[in-house]
Image (spheres, rainbow, N blue to C red):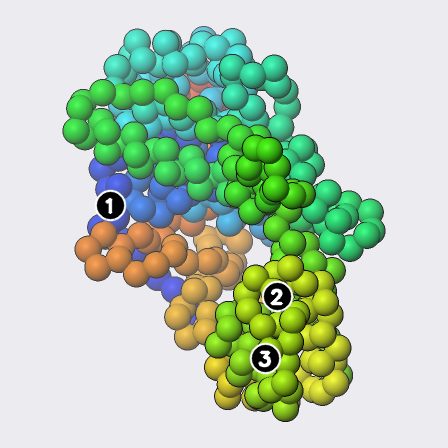
């Protein structure tokens, strides 16, 4: 049975209600950041080129320029097209910046400067602006200005090498945009902290949020290992995370995710399988012993789990209060009973795209709940509306359309 149609929220109680965000980002990292700000109540204006954000064109899609990735990154935003290489387009963008609290971009700073949108240029029209650049590498290092995409940043931070160490096979990228999305979260944190600082001091600022450094922190926090110390006390990597048998365990008829972690779990596991003798075994007796013999420990569990069915092990492990979870596919995740019960996957009737499924904002907020107030827009859907708000008359707007400074679009 399909989910009932969800209703867009008409009242904005979000913590960022009244905050204006100028979104000059594209692809995933920046749009993810600004969508989260929009979910929290910010009024987000997304400035796009005449061709639109690249993610508009990644299918499947119902209408041109409304690809599935775009639909998951650009709700709670209004779309305006501006050719920033034309003087009129830059002028309109600076007018937007003058009335914005936050500007977020994810091209190289040099590109922003060439467009006439450097921090100095934007601060000249809005001294209190919070100017957030989310891009590849810190400007003070030798990699400054290099192109950066999720695959490249995963590679340069060692993620594929970890998969190679774990499996002995060719290195692989993680099959999610972990760099873009995790660094997008860093950018959200930066915006919120800067807004708090400005609330206390009245002072805006420019902030760099860089992918290489952020994902390096993410990876090294787990895997610096023995090289945390000087001189080193051992090799890099957290052995448990790269153990060959750290993966969903194969049962006799499927797979199951199990984590037997602390001493209590291990004692309960050994009792459940009739191997109480292993509680004092040199490999299993305590956390340090298991960590030192992690490959053998995981191999033992893998062989044990394979001896019976998924249903058998789920019942046994749940009774023993040992952490266990389903190994979903993406398809079965969409049908998960918990996500269904919590309303995490609402369905909306989009005016042009038909019934679409979304993911909900995260968490329950007692006073300032995030919300979905508008669905992802067509390219330039709000160009006229936003330009009118900036003081442009209809004749001036039509002239800008004819000169290619802007483009209008929307529901047909």
- Vertical position of residue 29 compared to residue 166: above or below: above
Q: Which residue is mark 3?
A: 279
Query: Residue sitting at 72 percent across and 67 percent down?
Result: 296
How far apart are the alpha carbons under marks 2 and 3? 11 Å
Is 389 situated left or right of 346 in this image? left
Q: Secondary structure at mark 3?
A: helix
Q: Specify the quadrant of the image occupied by residue 229.
A: top right
Q: Nearer the viewer, mark 2 or mark 1?
A: 2
Disc 2 residue crowd, few under 14, some 14–19, many 20+, Cα 10 Å: many
How far apart are the alpha carbons under marks 2 and 1? 45 Å
The disc placed on residue 15 is: 1
Q: Specify the quadrant of the image occupied by residue 364.
A: bottom left
- Vertical position of residue 280 compared to residue 198: above or below: below
Determine if residue 40 is in view.
Answer: yes
- Vertical position of residue 100 compared to residue 284: above or below: above
Query: Residue sitting at 67 percent across and 39 percent down?
Result: 158
The disc placed on residue 290 is: 2
Determine if residue 311 is in view.
Answer: no
Indicate the position of residue 245 as horizontal and vertical percent values.
72, 65
Q: Nearer the viewer, mark 3 or mark 1?
A: 3
């Amino acid at each position: 049975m399909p989910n009932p149609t969800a209703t867009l929220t008409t009242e904005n109680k979000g913590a960022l209600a009244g905050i204006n965000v100028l979104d000059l980002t594209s692809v995933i990292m920046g749009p993810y950041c600004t969508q989260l700000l929009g979910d929290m109540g910010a009024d987000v204006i997304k400035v796009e080129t005449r061709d639109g954000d690249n993610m508009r064109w990644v299918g499947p899609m119902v209408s041109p320029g409304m690809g599935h990735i775009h639909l998951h990154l650009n709700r709670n935003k209004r779309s305006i097209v501006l050719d920033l290489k034309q003087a009129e387009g830059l002028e309109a963008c600076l007018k937007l910046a003058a009335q914005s609290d936050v500007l977020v971009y994810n091209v190289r700073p040099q590109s922003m400067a060439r467009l006439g949108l450097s921090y100095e240029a934007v601060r000249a029209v809005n001294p209190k602006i919070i100017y957030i650049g989310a891009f590849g590498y810190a400007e003070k290092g030798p990699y400054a200005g290099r192109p950066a995409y999720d695959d490249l940043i995963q590679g340069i931070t060692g993620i594929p090498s970890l998969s190679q160490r774990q499996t002995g096979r060719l290195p692989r990228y993680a099959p999610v945009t972990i760099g873009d999305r995790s660094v997008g979260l860093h950018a959200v944190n930066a915006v919120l902290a800067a807004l708090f600082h400005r609330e206390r001091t009245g002072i805006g600022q420019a902030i760099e949020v860089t992918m290489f450094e952020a994902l390096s922190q993410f990876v090294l926090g787990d895997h610096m290992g023995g090289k945390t110390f000087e001189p080193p006390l051992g090799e890099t990597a957290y052995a448990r995370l790269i153990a060959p048998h750290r993966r969903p365990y194969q049962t006799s008829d499927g797979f199951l995710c199990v984590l037997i972690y602390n001493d209590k779990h291990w004692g309960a596991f050994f009792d459940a399988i009739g191997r109480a003798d292993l509680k004092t075994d040199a490999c299993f007796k305590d956390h340090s012993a298991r960590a030192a013999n992690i490959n053998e420990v995981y191999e033992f569990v893998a062989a044990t789990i394979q001896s019976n069915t998924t249903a058998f092990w789920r019942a046994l492990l749940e009774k023993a209060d040992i952490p266990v979870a389903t190994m979903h596919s993406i398809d079965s995740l969409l049908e998960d009973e918990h996500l269904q019960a919590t309303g995490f996957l609402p369905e909306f009737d989009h005016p042009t795209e038909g019934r679409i499924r979304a993911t909900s904002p995260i968490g329950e907020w007692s006073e300032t709940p995030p919300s979905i107030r508008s669905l992802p827009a067509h390219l330039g859907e709000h160009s006229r509306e936003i330009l009118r708000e900036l003081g442009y008359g209809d004749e001036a707007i039509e002239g800008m359309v004819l000169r290619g400074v802007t483009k209008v679009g929307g529901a047909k």
